[in-house]
């Protein structure tokens, strides 16, 4: 799913799974299709956020070609999140 949060410059990729479906490759497979086709949606850059301790999501983002660019607070609860940007934006 794509979001456009007011606190972020670019639309961001979001994903979640119901318990019991983790580590089966579903997130990577679905997100990869979306990432490969963002140009068809008119999107030239894509971001993503994760909680600072969510290594599983950070690993998925790395496999998709994202790089961590910083840490920000985007919610009223003052919780810091990692921010990632998609590398090598070659639209085809």
Image: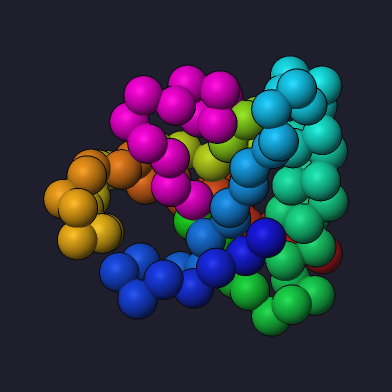
Residue 18, how many percent across, how many down? 71, 36
Is residue 9 visible in the rendered structure shown here? Answer: no
Q: Residue at x 41, y 71 (%)?
A: 5
The range drawn in magenta is 48-59
Residue 19, how many percent across, how many down? 69, 27
Residue 29, how many percent across, how many down? 83, 38
Residue 58, how many percent across, how many down? 50, 29
Q: Residue furthest bottom?
A: 42
Q: Residue at x 47, y 21 (%)?
A: 55
Q: Nearer the viewer, residue 84 or 76?
A: 76
- Look at the picture and state if 52 lies above or below 85: above
Q: Residue furthest left?
A: 78
- As drawn, is 62 to the left or to the right of 7? right
Q: Which quarter shows the C terminus?
A: bottom right
Q: Is residue 54 magenta?
A: yes
Q: How is the image coloured?
A: rainbow
Q: Which quarter shows the N terminus?
A: bottom right
Is residue 4 visible in the rendered structure shown here? Answer: yes
Q: Is residue 16 magenta?
A: no
Q: Residue at x 54, y 41 (%)?
A: 66
- Look at the picture and state if 74 lies above or below 81: below
Q: Nearer the viewer, residue 35 or 6?
A: 6
Q: Residue at x 19, y 53 (%)?
A: 77
């Amino acid at each position: 799913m794509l979001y456009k949060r007011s606190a972020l410059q670019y639309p961001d990729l979001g994903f979640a799974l119901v318990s019991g479906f983790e580590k089966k490759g579903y997130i990577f497979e679905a997100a990869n299709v979306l990432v490969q086709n963002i140009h068809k949606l008119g999107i030239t850059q894509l971001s993503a956020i994760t909680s600072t301790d969510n290594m599983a999501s950070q690993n998925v983002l790395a496999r998709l070609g994202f790089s961590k660019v910083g840490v920000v607070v985007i919610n009223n609860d003052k919780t810091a999140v990692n921010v990632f940007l998609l590398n090598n934006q070659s639209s085809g």
